[in-house]
Image: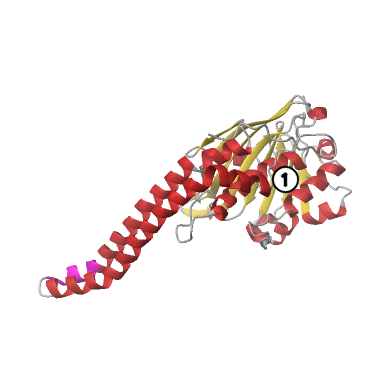
Amino acid sequence: MLSEQTPKIKKNAYGLELFAKEKTEFITFYEEHLQKELELLEVDRKKFMKGFILRIIAAPFLLLFIYFVFRDVTIFMILAAPLAITGWIGLYWMRYKEKLEAKAKKLIIPKLVQFMNPHFTYEPNGSLTLDDVNKMHIFKQKADFGVGDDLIKGYVYDEEEDAKTYLSFSEMIVRNDRKIHQKGKVIEKPLGMLAAGLLFKVEFNKDFGRSFTMIKPRWLLKKRKYRKKLKQFDKHHAMQEVLLENPEFMKKFIVHSTDQIEARVILQTDTMENILEFVNYVSDTIEGKPKKRKKERFIPYFSFYNNQVYVLIHTRSNHFILNIMKELNIDTVYDYFKDINVVLRFIDDLNLNLKLYIK
């Protein structure tokens, strides 16, 4: 059972409740509610690794055995033996890796999600959709393949503001694999991988009208596939670049919108500063040393549409998996914690539970 002690409510300078958790809160929660479960998982991991290493050691002896037993029978057996042994080891790896990850998703992540916010639910096999990605209009061509998992959804609630902010969040991989043929020739090649990382959508609680606004990192314009200017959002709305008065923001991002006025209403001074704070933040480790982050492994995209803000962070990583080659400890769970905390920090940074924004 999780502790029923009411946590102290944290507030920002505007008196709004802050929902993101601190590292000290996580450590206390881990020691009280998750440490024993993770220690049991570590026992299972060590048993798995012992069996895996024994199989690797046995592999050359099995090859020698097969060679001497079947060398006068058929050359096919000799050639097939390495593939069979590799398959035997690989099957063992995949089977037990999936078992350990399933245990983690059953014992660790649901408790962690409830700790992050009691109004959240967790679906290990659920995800946001390909349609959610394509609504962002961030790629020159629509993605035609998308897959994800580890769906977290629900809402945060500020009692004093009487404000609920609904959100959903999952891992997502999207690709464009389709080839367009004309007269027997390929006239358009697939782009392949478009993004792999974290996708979330959050209720903005503010009426955008029918406008659409999106934000991309400006450095991407140096890459060939991003150079083409946006012509149309749909049949009736042209996209225009929006020039804003924050030089730091404009240096880092490029903004396109179907409505210059609405884009400026959305991206007011404090909102631009908060987005910069959000993308510049680098979370630390348990030891306290922040990790260096390459810009190619943290590419944030933002779209404001239909009273939702969509955020896709391309990290080239699978976030809710176990690295079974490493010891399972508090750092393992802290990585999960940081991935969930990112959406709460986004709500805090953009003041999305502000009563002013309630529709």
Q: Position of residue 312 (x, y in %)?
A: 64, 46
Q: Secondary structure at mark 1?
A: loop
Q: Magenta part of the protein: which range?
A: 74-81
> Where residue 93 sits in the image (x, y, percent)?
36, 57
The residue positioned 54% from the left and 49% from the top of the image is 176
Q: Position of residue 209 (x, y in %)?
A: 77, 29
Kindly identify the residue that appears in the image at 35 percent across and 62 percent down: 50
Locate residue 152 relative to residue 6 in the image: left or right.
left
Q: How is the image coloured?
A: secondary structure
At a point 86% along the width and 47% down the height, the residue shown is 244
Q: Amino acid at mark 1?
A: Lys
Q: Is residue 335 above or below residue 19?
A: below
Q: Which quarter of the figure has residue 212? A: top right
Judging by the rendered image, the residue that carries numbered circle 1 is 231
Rendered view: 6 above or below 100:
above
**Residue visible at 68% across and 54% down?**
283
Residue 216 shown in magenta: no
Whether residue 130 is visible, yes or no, is no
Q: Which residue is outermost to the left?
A: 72
Q: Is residue 237 left or right of residue 244?
A: left
- Placement of 19 over or under 43, stated as above or below: above
